[in-house]
Image: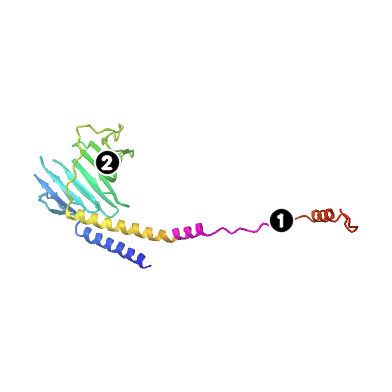
Amino acid sequence: MKYLLMVCLMTMSGSAFAAEQVEEFTAKLFTAKGTVECQKKGTAAWVAVEAPYLLEVGDQVRTGAKSKAEIYIKYGSKVRLGADTTFAIDKVSPTENSVNVVRGKMQAWIRKFVGRGFSVRTPAAVCAVRGTVFGVEVSEAGQTTWDLFSGSIQIADNRNRTVDLVPNQRLEVSQAEGAAAAPVAIPPTVEVPSEPAKIKEEKAEIKAELVIVEAKAKEEAALAKPEAKEEAVEEAAPAVVEPVTTVIATQEVVQAVCEVSASSPDCVTK
């Protein structure tokens, strides 16, 4: 009981620690090179920003020529925006983060965690992600190119057709025709993107997640121990051997007696 209480306290403290860390921010622009602007939710003006800069759901970010921006969104989503890119944060929650790439190029590193998802919307498709490194590029006409480097993604086009990609595959999706062609291999000239360094908020989240995972594992192990002991006792208990009872028919007994005392006049065999 004492051990279980300790595990519960560890789980609660881990959850509280995670909540304390992630509630401090929704997303952070931690790298801004060249021209990087932000349009806050509910406003029409684009304002030049520098890193670090805090973002909220509904904010948009755009980069100029020869520019880039790197953003960490709480609950394990990290993205890099290339030049001439327009990007928006649509949703941030413990179960799902969702972003929108209007145009331009984005690379993403999504940390896998139980019960958590990530999705990307473009003019031509929606992509569901589970613990993945991938890239997406949207042309001025809305043509979308998806490159998957690790993990798994499922892409749904505007015609409700879905395509699952495996690592090292590319898929082209257009607004007019959707995913008309099958996935192909990523060209050898395309390199796997290098992940940006972890920022303090990301490190804090990872640490909190590890505490939760370890506490959960200990809790499951503790709950499994009584069952293991019961099984061991059952296996060790000696088997009960029932005595064997032999029943001899009455006629057979009489015949046996007569054979032994055949001279007896009282011995009558039926």
Q: Residues within 10 Å of mark 2 (few under 14, many from 20)?
A: some
Q: Which residue is nearer to you in this view: 228 or 57?
A: 228
Q: Which residues are magenta?
A: 228-247
- The three-letter amino acid code for the residue at tag 2 is Ser
Q: Position of residue 198 (x, y in %)?
A: 18, 50
Report the residue at 17% width, 55% height from top: 200
Q: Position of residue 163 (x, y in %)?
A: 32, 38
Residue furthest out toward the right = 265
Q: Residues within 10 Å of mark 1 (few under 14, many from 20)?
A: few
Q: Which residue is nearer to you in this view: 178 or 115?
A: 115
The circle drawn on residue 221 is none
For residue 173, above or below residue 51: above
Q: Position of residue 238 (x, y in %)?
A: 54, 59
Report the residue at 10% width, 45% height from top: 33
What whole-number distance in Å separates the C-alpha atoms at marks 2 and 1?
72 Å
Left or right? Give the position of 69 relative to 175.
Answer: left
Q: Could one spot residue 26 in this view of the protein? A: no
Q: Quadrant of residue 162?
A: top left
Determine whether the residue tagged by mark 1 lies in a helix, strand or loop. loop
The circle drawn on residue 246 is 1
Left or right? Give the position of 40 relative to 179.
Answer: left
- Rendered image coloring scheme: rainbow
Q: Position of residue 148 (x, y in %)?
A: 26, 39
Q: Which residue is nearer to you in this view: 21 or 211?
A: 211
Q: Could one spot residue 53 in this view of the protein? A: yes
- The three-letter amino acid code for the residue at tag 1 is Thr
Determine whether the residue tagged by mark 2 lies in a helix, strand or loop. strand
Which badge, 2 or 1, comes first in the chain's sequence?
A: 2
Magenta-span inclusion, residue 23: no
In the rendered view of the protein, which quadrant contains the N terminus? bottom left
The circle drawn on residue 150 is 2
For residue 201, above or below residue 154: below
